[in-house]
Image: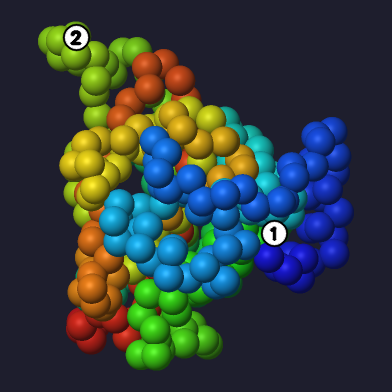
Amino acid sequence: MEISAFDEQASAQFYYCCSAQQPHKTQPRANRAEGPIPRFPLQHLETHAAEFLDTIRKHGFVVLSDIGFEGECLCQNLMLHLQSFFAQDDWSKARCTSKNNVYRSERGVPMWFLGYELDTFREAFRMQASRPDAQPWPSTDLKKSWLSLLKFVREICDKCLAIAIGKDFVPPSPYDNDYSVAYAVHYPNLDSTFDPYNPSGHTLNINEHCDPSLFVIEPCTHVQGLEILDHNSRSWIQVEQHCIPGKELILFGGKALQRSTYPPIPAAPHRVGRAQNQSRHVFIYEQKYESYFDAPVFD
Ligand SMILES: [Fe+2]
């Protein structure tokens, strides 16, 4: 990925963030799709497009490895900003909610105010990816970090969509009809929220579902939570158990991608498990271009 994905000042910040770490080797590893999880080097996306398609069609998801030093810094830097943001007091976070700007889904349905929201079991910070100016940003630093990672993952998803759709691909630029969503979620995963009557001890924060989106991408987190139903083995995979936190990206498809591809890339059923008493922060980008949805209907 090009270094131009972020500006000079932000770049210096990311290098500062990662300066204490040994740069991750960017030499692509062999495709390890035959391993416990399907894994594909990011650099091979376009040069080995057919293999990529075979892999994600077979499993419904793929882990993108070897994302490069800049990519790793972007992921790790935003994670630090998110942890700081969610650690603030409730008042400070609540003021980062816009009461004037509402996200409407691709069907024109009002979903939520942009920015911070608190739920009983999680808190989130949400933005419409194409409307950074409407966003109530907590700080300039978080905004820069967020938008840099957003650009990085959006370009990856656009490449994947171009590969998946082929000659019928409609370029998303200039994002006029872009309902894509970027959001961060904090799951406190407190012991007190556990169900003592669940004999397996395996409890969920989010039940099984498929997203309405095209591609969905998440940087691998340190605390596991995402579980995907492998289309090939028909078994649930705790994906983060097999990933390198901060160095790999989890990519899967939603219902719009399944509708728009032939042979279809199956929408990936997934759910979010609850890691006992381990706080989990995650950043998610869901690709939603109007061209691949029914026309929205506004009030
Ligand atoms: Fe989801």
Residue 76 left/right relative to 291? right
Task: Report the side of 187 relative to 281 (left or right).
Answer: left
| Mark 1 close to ligand 1, CB under 8 Å | no
Q: Position of residue 111 (x, y in %)?
A: 28, 62
Q: Quadrant of the C terminus?
A: bottom left
Cβ at disc 2 under 8 Å from ligand 1:
no
Quarter of the image with the N terminus is: bottom right
Residue 70 located left or right of residue 233 = right
Q: Residue at x 38, y 66 (%)?
A: 53
Q: Which mark is residue 196?
A: 2
Q: Give the left or right position of residue 204, taking residue 250 as reference.
A: left
Which of the labelled discs sits on residue 144, or is there none?
1
Q: Quadrant of residue 228?
A: top left
Q: Label 1 amino acid?
A: Lys
Q: How is the image coloured?
A: rainbow
Identity, as a three-letter code, of the amino acid under mark 2 = Pro
Q: Which of the pair 287/184 is nearer the observer?
A: 287
Q: Which mark is residue 197?
A: none
- Estimate the x, y position of residue 281 in percent, counting from the top left: 49, 36
Residue 36: image location, x then y, percent: 39, 35
Q: Residue at x 26, y 45 (%)?
A: 230
> Against 47, is 136 above or below?
above
Mark 1 vs mark 2: which is more N-terminal? 1
Q: Secondary structure at mark 2?
A: loop
Nearest the eye: 42 or 12: 42
Q: Residue at x 22, y 54 (%)?
A: 210
